[in-house]
Amino acid sequence: MIMTKKEEGIKNKITKADELIKNDQWGEAINILNEVLEEDKDNKQAKVKKDQAEQIMKFRNSDIYACTNLHMDPWLDE
């Protein structure tokens, strides 16, 4: 199977994003995955990795000491 330069470039970017994720460089990985999605909007692998990275960033950046109801659950409010 012969890949075009565009496909090869996308594959290389996803590989680089994987390496950044392994090194806990989530923001840079998300930026690279956004570039991939600009080139190929239907790339499922990039979409899944980006969604996972965004969820992890969301939870890592939550200040657990600021509020005990981090996800704004109405049944926990008093």
Image: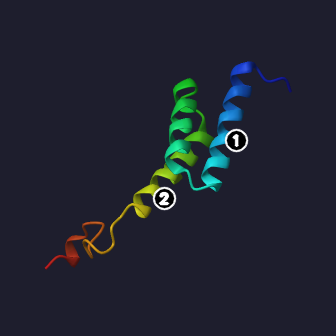
Q: Which residue is mark 2?
A: 56
SS class of the residue under badge 1? helix
Q: Which mark is residue 44?
A: none
Q: Residue 63: x percent and y percent?
A: 33, 67
Q: Seen in the image, is 68 located left or right of residue 36?
A: left
Task: Specify the quadrant that holds the N terminus.
Answer: top right
Q: Residue furthest right?
A: 1
In the image as oriented, which residue stretches furthest toward the top? Answer: 5
Image position of 5 with respect to 44: above or below: above
Q: Residue at x 17, y 76 (%)?
A: 77
Instruction: Give the side of residue 16 with respect to residue 77, left or right.
Output: right
Q: CA distance from mark 1 to mark 2?
A: 19 Å
The quadrant in which residue 11 appears is top right
Please identify the quadrant where the C terminus is shown: bottom left
Give me the residue at 22% from left, 78% from top. Answer: 76
Is 60 placed left or right of 21 in the picture? left
* Percent of width and height locating residue 59: 42, 63
Outermost residue to the left? 78
The residue positioned 49% from the left and 46% from the top of the image is: 27
Give the structural element (helix, strand or loop) at label 2.
helix
Task: Tell which circle, 1 or 2, labels the residue nearer the N-terminal end.
Answer: 1
| Residue corresponding to mark 1 | 15
- Do callouts 1 and 2 mark residues in contact (Cβ within 8 Å)? no
Image quadrant where residue 39 sits: top right
Amino acid type, label 1: Thr
- The x and y percentages for residue 4 are 76, 20
Q: Quadrant of residue 70?
A: bottom left
Q: Where residue 8 sits in the image (x, y, percent)?
A: 74, 27
**Is the residue 26 above or below the residue 78 in the image?**
above
Kind of residue at badge 2 = Ile
